[in-house]
Image: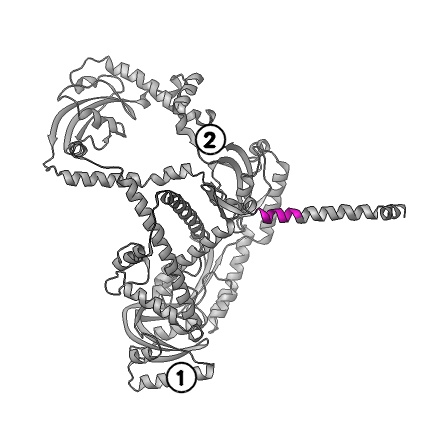
Amino acid sequence: MATLQNIRTKGPLLVIVIGLALFAFIAGDAWKVLQPHQAHDAGEVNGEALSAQEYQAMVEEYTEVVKFSSGMKSLDDEQTNQIKDEVWRSYVNNKLIENEAKKLGLTVSKAEIQAIIDAGVNPILQQTPFRNPQTGAFDKDMLKKFLVDYAKMDKKQMTPQYLEYYESLNKFWSFIEKSLTQSRLAEKYQALVTKALFSNSVEAQAAFDARVNQMDLLLAAIPYSSIVDSTVVVKDSEIKDLYKKKKEQFKQYVETRDVKYIDVQVTASAEDKAAIQKEVAEYTNQLAAADVDYTSFIRTTGSTYPYVDIPYTKKALPTDIAARLDSVSMGQVYGPYYNAGDNTINSFKVLAKEAAADSVEFRQIQVLAADAAKTKVLADSIMGALKAGGDFAAIAKKYGQTGDANWMSSANYENAQVDGDNLKFLKAVTSLGVNELANLSLGQANVILQVTNKKGVQDKYKVAVIKRAVEFSKDTYNKAYNDFSQFVAANPTLDKLTVNAEEAGYKLLERKDLYSSEHGIGGVRGTKEALKWIFAAKQGEVSGLYECGESDHMMVVALAGVTEEGYRSVDQVKDQLKAELIRDKKAEKLIAQLGGVKASSIEQFKSVANVVTDSVKHVTFAAPAYVAALRSSEPLVGAYASVAQLNQVSAPIKGNAGVFVLQVFAKEKLNEKFDVRAEENTIESMHQRMASRFVNDLYLKANVKDKRYLFF
């Protein structure tokens, strides 16, 4: 009671304290709203921020473009990640070029884009559906017709399927127009840069000579591998001196992090496999019974391969099923059996086999009236007119459609999700005879369908397949989770993880130079949260347990090191520098060894310890020579041979894989006429490739910040 009385006496003070706390909470959210760039930026280019919402909108736009152009309904994680990276790359490149173009006054007019469309040869236009059926070339008239039809179409009178297609096609074309503008601006800027690089007759002659002048030579070499690395002493001071000379090579433009992690993949136990085997055996007995609704039955078995009541080619069936198909009689059940290829337990029943056309040509007329009753009446009327000999194309045009025929093969629908109206439509297409008609009620509309041609007869099958993955049970996962979580709790430091992982049955993995732009860790899906933790953690910290993968992985991550933006330290590149110094010191010894041999021919070097000899023909200055005896490409062979005197032994030369001397014994010139214009064109093409790298230079100067990992 005394406590309650004390609280009552402090009532006004508590109200003030709570009020201030609420204000701080609300004000904090308001501050985030007023400064969204601090919490919601996906990246930055030249000081210009890209919000997470803007980036997501671009990803969604490009996703729809990819789905429309590929015909896919959905994308997997890998495809989605590729789209995210492509959208970011395109955004950055376009911003870099736009920034430079603005300084120079470069623009792209609508007239330029129209001229590109009229010409119809731009590669981007070849990726659109507006192509001539005979030639495959872009057809601007098809595009114009679509744009006119889209502007005039009555959306209320169109079936949802066609309306969705037209809307998607319009968005697709809008994206293509934008891409054409960006591509054209990049071309103009690159052309400007390329023109700053030019060739002349002197350079053309040098390039020609470097290619057509060929030498045949003999070579004697001592490989660096003939000297054991441990016998070469390298001082720390030498490493530091070399680091200073090569420091610019070790510049780090983006922060990376080194991690150590344990990835635990949960797999089915022997008990789990036995339980699934028992289930499949019971389902197999039911499958062997009299006819059932196979679509529903296979669905109840949990099979990863659904049953579709349409004959499929053998190649559409799982490979293990197809391999056993011909050994099973009609109506017979095969299985259960275990297939190691996809870790499944299987059985199947052959229901039917027939020879059927694999490709069908058909045409259709969509019918949609004010309501279902009027739609049926109109469809029946059109069907009657066609049966009476009416012209299909003419009737289709009467209702605003072309009535053009289209080909469809089994590849268009096999292994796709087929049910409902789609199944009804496909059954009609595949079962109708040539020139036969069908009046199908599909959703709110009717479709008048006619098959006009068939070809490519193949054996097709109806097979009911039970395919069950051997998956771990909940108990198996819980045991693995409890064991791993106890280990993580008992080893909260990197040192403890390193010491105790192997004894506990876990493997500690390592990944150096992990970038925030990557989509995961160790190739495991669903590790984005762990990635966020890594780039927020301090060196030496250990994360908690992450459940990831496809609900079958667990992971713990430790931050082992941070390489900040700037220059890598001497310690980080010590091994690389030491290897280079060891090679240089070996080269000094071998040069002295070969230089001490007074020889007038390569033959005289054969008695030198560890020497290997080789003959190399058709050596030119233009291309590095491959020396089989050293198993290495050696650019200096061509360089020295191009100026060497015939039959004279060169001084020792330091190469990539060893020290060598060479003796040119023949020189010739290819029977090729010098064409100054052709050579200059080749050089100009090389300059264009060089100029295309300008984006890298712009990127390094633009202070690009990629913070997508915080959101995506």
Q: Residue at the spot x=44%, y=71% of the render?
A: 160
Q: What is the total number of numbered labels drawn onto the structure image?
A: 2
- Foreground disc of the pair 1, 2: 2
Residue at horizontal 31%, vertical 22%? 224
> What is the x, y in percent for residue 544?
60, 41
The residue wearing badge 1 is 378
Residue bearing the label numbered 2:
566
Q: Amino acid at mark 2?
A: Gly
Residue segment shown in magenta:
27-35
Location of residue 230 by image quarter:
top left
Q: What is the C-alpha distance between the residues marked 1 and 2?
A: 74 Å
Q: Secondary structure at mark 2?
A: strand
Query: Label 1: how many residues lie within 10 Å, few (<14), some (14-19) or many (20+)?
Result: some
Is 228 in front, or is 342? 228
596 to the left or right of 333:
left
Colour setting:
one colour
Question: 66 or 294: which is nearer to us?
Answer: 66
Would you say the magenta stretch is mainly helix, strand or loop? helix
Say which amino acid is labelled 1: Leu
The front one of 24 and 294 is: 24
Position of residue 488 measured from the top left corner of the image (x, y, whole percent): 61, 39
Q: Nearer the viewer, residue 281 or 201?
A: 201
Q: Residue furthest front?
A: 105
| Relative height, residue 338 to residue 520 (above, below) | below
Q: Residue at x 42, y 25 (%)?
A: 575
**Label 2 environment density (alpha carbons within 10 Å; few <14, some 14–19, many ≥20):** few
Q: Position of residue 380 (x, y in %)?
A: 39, 85
Which numbered disc covers residue 678? Answer: none
Secondary structure, mark 1, is helix
Q: Is residue 552 visible?
A: yes
Left or right: where does residue 261 sit relative to residue 697?
right
